[in-house]
Image (tube, rainbow, N blue to C red):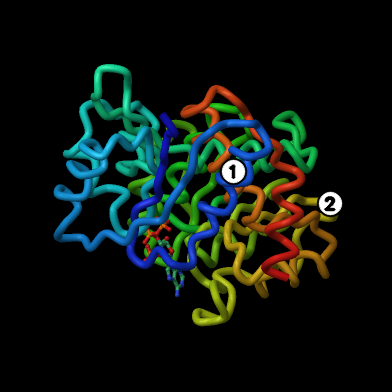
Amino acid sequence: MKKWYAVIGNPIAQSMSPTMHDAWFRENGIDATYIPIHVDAERLGEAVASLKRLGCSGWNVTVPHKSAIIPYLDEVDEVARRMNAVNTVKVLEDGSLFGTNTDGQGFVRSLQEIGAAPNEVEELLVIGAGGAAAGISYALEAARFGRISITNRTLEKAEQMAEAFPGSHALSLKEAQMAIDKFDLIVQTTSVGMNFAQSGMPLDPTGISEGAVIADIIYNPLETEFLRRAQEAGGKTMNGVGMFVHQGALAFELWTGVYPDTKKMIQSITTELG
Ligand code: ATR
């Protein structure tokens, strides 16, 4: 029987996941399909029951359900628990629901794909202290990428996050700005610069050290003001397309056992968004 997968969220119409997964199914000769499903927050439980009943093999979870879905799952791994967010669900053989989160590891894979190696990064700065920042910090820590500093508009949230990562510490935006030249890797995880709606930058990358890797997890627009300035300042920049593709590839691998072609996918999504 043809297998099917889905992504649930609200809004969902703009999601690029269906096109991406369908292309990978085709490329790998897997008889399956992937559909977007609009799910309102108050109907999440009903939606999960329906997905199970209708034989869905697994699904991605996006805004606003990433945390809310946890009580409906049978098992959640450590990554997802620490992030308090699930982005991928797999229906196991016995019908039980397993949840994980591939966002952080997806980010690390995309970083590795552009050639950034853990031994080249001593000091790294994470901007933001939300779910995305936590997932990325967790994965960077696991991959042994340097010492983590966390900065955030609301300093208390950076301090709370730093407590969860032994060896990391919180900085105010002002402190981070003043020390900007000491970081080998800077990861921008806030929504500032997204979709042109929230213009501006959380921090000015002018003054970064030559050759530092500067990543923004935003992919729409492909180049935020933060990335543009970082590039002008001599940084090696990376937008969020790679993370998006690799988080999907990790989900695809969990479902099918195959790690799909990410390079070609990054190119085609970049062309589509460009
Ligand atoms: P996500 O799961 O995508 O990380 P989130 O948990 O809502 O989303 O976190 C959003 C992050 O973006 C937070 O670090 C937030 O800063 P605050 O903790 O101060 O709210 C940051 N953020 C959002 N809008 C911002 C803005 N206009 N300026 C600076 N930081 C902003």
Residue sitting at x 68%, y 47% = 185
* Corner quadrant of residue 233: bottom right
Callout 1: 10 Å neighbours few (<14), some, many (20+)?
A: many
Q: Nearer the viewer, residue 99 or 214?
A: 99
Q: Is residue 195 above or below residue 162?
A: below
> Of all residues shown, which one is farthest toward the front?
1
Dot 1 amino acid type: Phe
Q: Secondary structure at mark 1?
A: helix
Residue 55 drawn at (x, y percent) = 29, 35
Residue sitting at x 80%, y 38% = 115
- Is tag 2's residue or tag 1's residue first in the polypeptide sequence? 1
Residue 136 drawn at (x, y percent) = 51, 43
Q: Is residue 182 above or below residue 225?
A: above
- Compared across the picture, whether 38 is left or right of 271 comes to left
Residue sitting at x 60%, y 26% = 258
Q: Quadrant of ligand 1?
A: bottom left
Q: Is the shortest distance between ligand 1 and the CB of mark 1 under 8 Å? A: no
Q: Is residue 215 above or below residue 222?
A: above
Q: Is residue 183 above or below residue 270?
A: above
Dot 2 amino acid type: Gly
Residue 201 drawn at (x, y percent) = 59, 74
Residue 123 drawn at (x, y percent) = 65, 42
Q: Quadrant of the N terminus?
A: top left
What's the distance in space between the residues labelled 2 and 1, CA to CA? 19 Å
Residue of label 1: 107
* Corner quadrant of residue 41: bottom left
